[in-house]
Image (spheres, grey):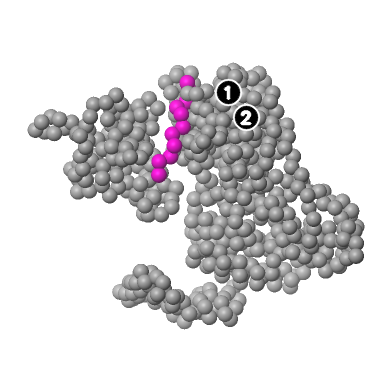
Amino acid sequence: MPPQWDEDEPSATEKYRRERHWKEKLHTSLRTRFALTEYADIQRCLQLGASFPHLLLQRIAEQGRQRYQAPSQWDVRLAIELLKAEQADQRHWQIAVEIDAWIRASRQQVKSDFALHANFFKKDTVEETAALFRLARPVMERYVQHLESTHTVDHEGTILKAWQYLRDNTVRPQWKVVLIDEYQDVNPAQAAFVHALLKPVTHKLPSSGARLTAVGDDWQAIFGFQGGDVDLIRCFNDPAETHQGFSERIELKQSHRFGQAIADSTRQFVIQGKGAIARTVIGRPELDPDARWPASIILASTRLTREGERRLGKRHAGLTAGVLAVLIRIGEQCEDADVLIVARRNADLQKPEMLDNEGPGIDRRTIGQSAARLGVSVTYSTVHKAKGTEADYVILLDTGPPHAGRLAANRVLDRALRVFRGHDTADEEERRIWYVALTRAKRKVYIIVDGDRHSLLADELYYNKNGHYDVGEDELAEFLEPMRPMVPCPVCIKKESTTAVLAMRAGHSGYFVGCTSYDSGSTHHCGHTERACGHCGQGLMIRIGNGLAQCQAPNCKQTVPLCRGTTPRPMVVRTNRRTDIPFWGCQRYGTKRSCKWTVRKKSTSNGT
């Protein structure tokens, strides 16, 4: 326990001691052995340069568990075979993937180990991140020793070796001009190698070095998972700090791909990210949207209206129905149009596994048949593969944040890699990924959100604060219901920052509202449920402030007061048994957790 807790954090001290006593009592009652470590052990390991996991495993071995050996005795291949033989659970493999990614990211750096180590402890990290650092470091040291002893080199090693040869003047480059494309995707080792190519031949003639022309766009830096560091193009300095050059930034403002409406909206969208370099973008005026539906970005849900069911058929649902509705509108606007359907994941572009074509995924066969009848050419791609392509119209399938980003293991890895990436985060890169998707279109972008799983970036476009974005929803309103913003779970949001939201569900007695934490398993479910709108019976009530909630259904918009319970819920109409006068009461009336708050019901035009 850190000694300063007694003075600075008395509540944390009490919690720590209480939990420690509980753990010791639990092990005693179960007659199980345990290894006890102190805060001083961690500090001692840091001072001596020892491995804390090594000490921990020694403590475990002292308890008689001889199957745990010190890291220096590990045989990696044997360990992998044992994991396969024992059919290890997914978490074991996640740890291996985290360590592997951390090692690759570490070997793409050119700073000294001391500088990286100091940078690590300056970051606002959590215990899991620190554990990953200490676990991965001994593994990487053994890996490097293996490469040296076997006289082999890996992919990262080739760049590091080439940079070292240039740095030590072992090799003198003869090139006078160096041209590099997609510079926003380079990692620190690659950037240091490029700057080493520019080193002057003699110190007396600084101009005797090579000239570099690098083309890149920090707005399109979307390969952070491969080690790309967007700060390298924003600062354009040598990350190794061995060569000081002079650079001039030339901004290319003219875009020949999309019209001015998309240029303005996407520019405003991407510069909301931290660190993005703001600049002017000029589009092609002849590529403006159709005058009948002037918006350049269209948002819609996958829920069919009655006219949509009549035109498309009830057998089509989900993302497939949304795409079919968009193709009808595109066919009315442009002859022989090119349409690019993009998604965040490959799974979203495959046929759904669920019955009746519901759930994430699309039916390509049905879409292809409809496109052929309408004279539209359709191609499919993930956002990363679509980089560099273009089409008249783009359909972006939004099924929510990538599943990898929801896993705790991946969030821990992102925090660990932040040590190497500076201030850039996975959320900032996700915004740039969306920018790439939006700017593949020449004329218009259609964003089809999949029910309650859509991304927070779709919410940003929907709310359109200050009117920065050229967004509309009228064009598809005939076939598809408008997008409904996500409503955070009022229980989960009190506990911690979470992506859990309220979603409509079908029950035995009709629709009800439940938290999406249910999808993570019963142990993670907060248990929060609400009734659907009492007026239309199928709307989700959103909190609009001033103690009120409003139905999301576009044809309802019923407004009701919220109760004053621990978790305020939309109130429902009840009737006084003695006077037959209606009033607003808690929807959980009759249960132990209901509140006694009531509000007099007034007859108004909107039903409140």
Q: Which residue is found at the position 44% from the left and 77% from the top?
A: 3
The verdict on residue 64 being magenta is no
| Crowd tier of the residue under label 2, counting other residues whose Cα lies within 10 Å: few below 14, some 14–19, many 20 or above | many
| Crowd tier of the residue under label 1, counting other residues whose Cα lies within 10 Å: few below 14, some 14–19, many 20 or above | some
Provide the secondary structure element on which disc 1 rests. loop
- Is there any visible trace of residue 219 in the rendered image? yes
Residue under label 1: 294
Q: Amino acid at mark 1?
A: Pro
Quadrant assignment for the N terminus: bottom left
- Is there any visible trace of residue 100 in the rendered image? no
Magenta segment boundaries in residue numbering:
478-488
Residue under label 2: 261
Find the distance from the CA under tag 2 to the CA under tag 1. 9 Å
Q: Determine the residue located farthest toward the front in the rendered image.
A: 466
Q: Image height check: is 18 above or below 542?
A: below
Helix, strand or loop: magenta stretch: loop
